[in-house]
Image (tube, helix red, strand yellow):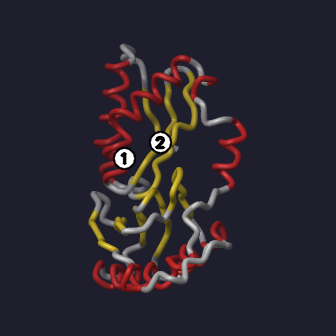
Amino acid sequence: MRERPSLAPEDILVRMQPTPNPYALKFICNLPFKTEGKATFSSRYECQSMPLCQSLFDIAGVKQLHLFQNTLTISHAGELTEETMEEQVESVVKTRMPVHDPTFITEDEKEKQSLSKDISNLSPEMQKIEEILDRTIRPGLRADGGDLDVISYEDNTLKILYQGACGGCPSAMMGTLDAIQGILQQEMQNPEIKVRPV
């Protein structure tokens, strides 16, 4: 674990932003939560060697953490008011950031690295789908504290996994899903494409 003891709580700036999901809050920090890639944790057990994330799971009602660059998205059960949640998250971030290592790599990332991040070994259809999603969909999802991963593409059906604020969000399940399907149908020139969340 890389310690940054020179950081004082007053050096750490945290700003909360609402998301389209009423059960997700996005926090922007002046320091990175994750320098490369993204990470999603759904339990305290998944982040055992990470004091920052473990302490966030100690806040009442926290169900999931999504870390991407200097953004932290917290999905919650609504047990606390938004103001109380904001205060508690800010307190945890300010006290735990000095011992947080933003260069951490998750087990999923290790597996993906071993399979190679290079999309050139994907089928031409999958390469095009990833390029379209990177260009049209993912920037908006990330701006709202979420993201998506492609799980599979078979028989004109694309299976995706929503992450961060997008997981369990009513607009992700309705409007966003329709938009993704429409964009892919148009850009792939294939009206048969269906998009399904997993």
Identified at 51% across, 53% down, the residue is 38
Q: Position of residue 182 (x, y in %)?
A: 31, 27
Q: Amino acid at mark 1?
A: Met
Q: Nearer the viewer, residue 76 or 28?
A: 28
Q: Position of residue 125 (x, y in %)?
A: 51, 19
Q: Quadrant of residue 178?
A: top left
Residue 5 vertical position relative to residue 188 in the rendered view, above or below = below
The residue tagged with tag 1: helix, strand or loop?
helix
Mark 2 and mark 1 in contact? Answer it, CB < 8 Å. Answer: yes
Where is residue 25 drawn, in percent x and y?
34, 67
118 lies above or below 25: above
How would you rate the neighbour count of disc 2 (Cα within 10 Å): few for under 14, some for 14-19, many for 20 or more? some
Residue tagged by mark 2?
A: 197
User: SS of the residue at dot 2?
Assistant: strand
Q: Residue at x 27, y 65 (%)?
A: 18
Q: Which mark is residue 41?
A: none
Residue under circle 1? 173
Q: Quadrant of residue 131?
A: top left
Q: Is residue 46 left or right of residue 60?
A: right
Determine the residue positioned at 30% across, 35% down: 179
Q: Residue at x 57, y 32 (%)?
A: 152
What amino acid type should be assigned to the residue bearing mark 2?
Pro
